[in-house]
Amino acid sequence: MTDIFTRTLKVRLSEVDPWALLKVQSIFDWFQDIGCEHAAELGISAAELLVRNYTWVLLKYQVRVTRYPSWNEEVTLTSWRAPLNDLYDLREFRVTDASGETLITGNSAWVIMDFNTRKPTRLSRCLTQAQRSEKGLIPDSFERILPVKNPQHTTDFRVRISDLDFNRHVNNSIYIGWALEALPESFLSRHLPTELEVRFVREIARGRAVLSEAQREDTSERAFLHRISGKDGEGELMRMRTVWQPMERFDIPSQIRSLG
């Protein structure tokens, strides 16, 4: 058992985009998987909590990308955690390349939810004193995300059973994909996000219709505000802010670049 959890990964074909770079959604899948593995090692996994009708639920994310790893590249994914005020479990992530250069960082906040009432509960109801001890400092650096008020881009989806996860709600990476999909292809084909601030608000069930909206932020042409909401009165499900950089800034593999 360790306070810092590390895994070496190789970027798989199923995890890359048309430019052979790691998909944005795959970043969130990686973070979720290593967080789950670490929690299991500490004896606080979702499976162990579920025996007592509790589970982990993601509340916030803050992700920064310096470089996207490419297909077949080997990287190291590291994660550690620190409880905060008996309410949140903060977890930080770092992806580094073979030379030790930091490519991606992430900060997240998790709560424990009562599986029956679907409401958050205090960590002390489910975790021991040792599991709640502050073994490392993680800054509570999450920024306020402004709401979408004048959507310029919209698209809609219907929740599929394949969108649901272990907790029987839409997985966090699915929301990210929905949010990005609202932007026009002319923009998505020429830019990649380097900053993502995410706030999850509520759940939605299979078969329900959802709306993805985005608007350009007033202060920057490369920043967008995003909102996912239920179309049948469920209200706001997620909000996000993204900052983007032109595709030419990124190291696209030469064999893929030649195809363009």
Image (cartoon, rainbow, N blue to C red):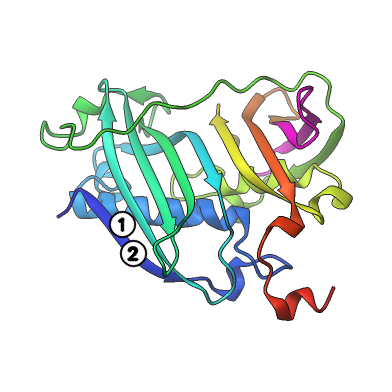
Residue range (magenta): 205-226
When the figure is inspected, residue 248 is found, relative to residue 184, above or below; the finding is: below
Q: Between 96 and 81, which is closer to the camera in this rendering? A: 96
Distance between mark 2 and mark 1 Cα atoms: 10 Å
Q: Quadrant of the C terminus?
A: bottom right
Is 62 located above or below residue 256 in the figure? above
Residue 240 location, quadrant: top right
Give residue 7's mark: 2
Q: Position of residue 72 (x, y in %)?
A: 54, 77
Q: Quadrant of residue 138?
A: top left
Q: Residues within 10 Å of mark 2 (few under 14, many from 20)?
A: few
Residue located at (53% from left, 54% from top)? 27
Q: Position of residue 103 (x, y in %)?
A: 50, 55
Determine which residue is flagged by label 1: 37
Choose the circle earlier in sequence order: 2 or 1: 2
Q: Amino acid at mark 1?
A: Glu
Nearer-the-camera pick, 187 or 12: 187
Q: Secondary structure at mark 2?
A: strand
Provide residue 131's location: percent of width, then percent of height.
16, 37
